[in-house]
Image (cartoon, rainbow, N blue to C red):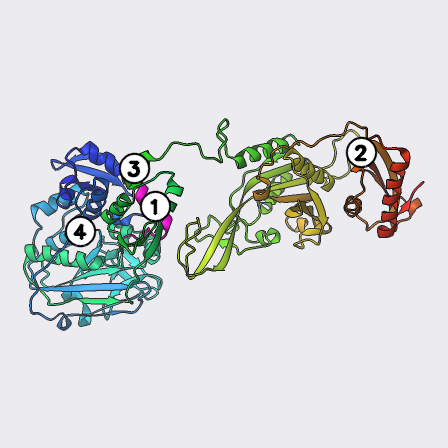
Amino acid sequence: MRFPLSWIREFAPIPEDINIVSKGFTFSGTEVEEIIDSEGETVFDFNFTVNRPDLMSVYGLARESSAVFDISSPKFSPNPRKSQLKIEENISIEVLDPDLCPRYRALVIKGLKVGHSTSLIQKRLIQCGLRPINAVVDATNYVLLEYGHPLHAFDLKFINGKKVIVRRAKDGETIKLLDGSEKKLTENILVIADEIRALAVAGVMGGEESGVSFLSRDILLEGAVFNPVSIRRTSKTLNIHTDASHRFERGCDYEGPVKALDRVAELILEMCGGQLCDSDIDIKAGNKKTEKVALRIPRIKKVLGIDIPKDKIINILEKLAFKIEDFDSENLTVTIPSFRVDVEREIDLIEEIVRIYGLDKLPARIPTVIDEESGRSESQIVENKIRHFLSCRNLLEAISFSMTDPALDPLFSFKGEEIKLSNPLSETNSILRRSLIPNLLLAVKKNSSFGNRSFGFYEIGKVYFKYRKEKSTEPNKDSNNDYHICEKDVIVTEEPRLAIILYEEDTVKSFNQFYPRDIYSLKGIIEGLFESLRKKCSFLEERPYSEIFSQDNFAKILCDDQEMGYFGYLEPQKLRSLEIKGMVCIAEIFLDRLLKRSDPSFKQFSRFPFSKRDLSILVANNVKWASLETTIKNANVQNLKKIELIEVYQDENIGKENKSLTFALYFQSAQKTLSDSEIENEVNQIIDLLKSNFNAVLRS
């Protein structure tokens, strides 16, 4: 947006040096993209961020400059001359949808003569990129640029029944707009109407039939506050973007219609004459609550890492029109002005302070979580180790969208509500993923359709959850976290995940082919991954979370008795319904727990040798090795250091209901070489334990 510096100087004594002004605005967050010479004056082309609609005016920039350059604050107090005419005799107003229009204010001017606006107004409109039309329309555009609040003028004689109704459009209702286009409206669009038809699309554009022309004698001036979401949807639906909608959809000042309407009435009376009715019509859907935020002085230093004097903090906030109340040595109570729709929390106030104080004054330090040599954070270092390990196991890294198919997502999502996208790319990508598996399954389907018979993928990415959480209305002032007073909140969280998927079309391999990509391969990959990160994992057989998993091949992954994820086979019948043939096994690991790097530690090793004993036992088929291993480890056999499974054997000779397990036990002492009798005593202790717990039979 373009604004001439001479106009800003009418409100605030900004420096004469344009380079100082440009640098001051840019370094405080209001970027000056270009400096232009227009109509013999210097014009700045500003790039405003979407959260700062309060800056999109001359007065807003003057208010900002008072803090940036530490100069006097601007004043804006229009006072139009009023007559004895009664507004109630000329117009009545009814707001049927206060949720979409929380405030509607109107003035009436009678007996004016519409001509051309002054040369100064026309010049400034041209400098800002607008075209002069007539005195009334130019005045509304001029005040839009000057004060930042959109206004509209209606010719009073075209308002049927002398009544304005703010309502939703009737489905199929049409209106011809000021740009000459005819639009078909829906019931979700808010309109300004009379008793017969729609006169304007609220917050977007006025209608051609009720517009002000050189023949107009009596006019209605409108200033309102509209729901930003409603204006945004209307603008997108009608494919119309105007200066008014640009501001309304970003949020506008609840008190804006007061000064803006008074100012435009003042200008119109000066240029066109006429009489302003003695009062206004101001309809409010309740008074807007004044927002107050607690600001802790010690918290500012903790966030920024620098000491800002308290009097400097107060001066910056007051220059930005914040009000300071009831403060003590370490706490301030800050009242948020109605035009600052972007400030809600303590951290927002801290951002305001530091951008004015000077971002260049922040200390240049490497964050404590960043490694000085590599320039990576701890989590990035661990992620790279994971990538290296899995790539060395012939797994290919996949990168997929954060969106996924709502038909697949529930099969692998076991917590939180799904997050639907309001404007999805397609129906099959209409929600944010709660698991990495669905998109990897689609990659498996695509690759298998191209004839790839054996492959493995992994992906490191984030998943998203939505929770509904009741929050206290009392802020915790001792907390170091940012807070916002809120009765009820919907909380969206994101979590890092690692997913691994192995696919094998033909499970029968010849002797010279590599090992199959089955669940045992996946289990070995998981164990090796944890070991490479200096962590020890274990597995706990569980019932599957979803029917898509095989009922007999599903387990949780544990580390230090904490659940780290799960792995298992997918049910072949379910895979066939997804047009996937072959065998698929998957694992999903919760990375937020795995990304915590474990520092190496030294443990005294024994200088005495290991003694190894092999055992073969006969147990029932339903007995899992994990249960046997856990039982042996929990027996606290004094010198047992390691257990290793060697072979699982099944044959009709040992019975269809039985299986043979062969495993090795390693014994070692830190004080001496163990004797045969000491080892045999501990072996017998283990055998007795397995017999009593699992009816195990020792094979000779």
- 534 versus 542 height, above or below: above
Circle 1: is it few (<14), some (14-19), or many (20+) Cα within 10 Å?
A: many
Q: Which residue is mark 4?
A: 141
| 4 or 2: tag closer to the N-terminus | 4
Q: CA distance from mark 3 to mark 1?
A: 12 Å
User: Can residue 153 be seen in this snapshot?
Assistant: yes
Q: Earlier in the sequence, mark 3 or mark 1?
A: 1
Decide whether residue 184 is among the magenta residues.
no
Label 3, label 4: how far apart the Cα atoms are: 34 Å
Q: Is residue 700 left or right of residue 255?
A: right
Residue 126: x and y, percent? 15, 43
Q: How far apart, in angstroms, are the residues tagged by discs 4 and 2?
A: 90 Å
- Lateral position of residue 280 relative to residue 229, left or right: left
Closest to the camera, between mark 4 and mark 2, is 2
Predominant secondary structure in magenta? helix
Q: Secondary structure at mark 2?
A: loop
Magenta residues (range): 340-354
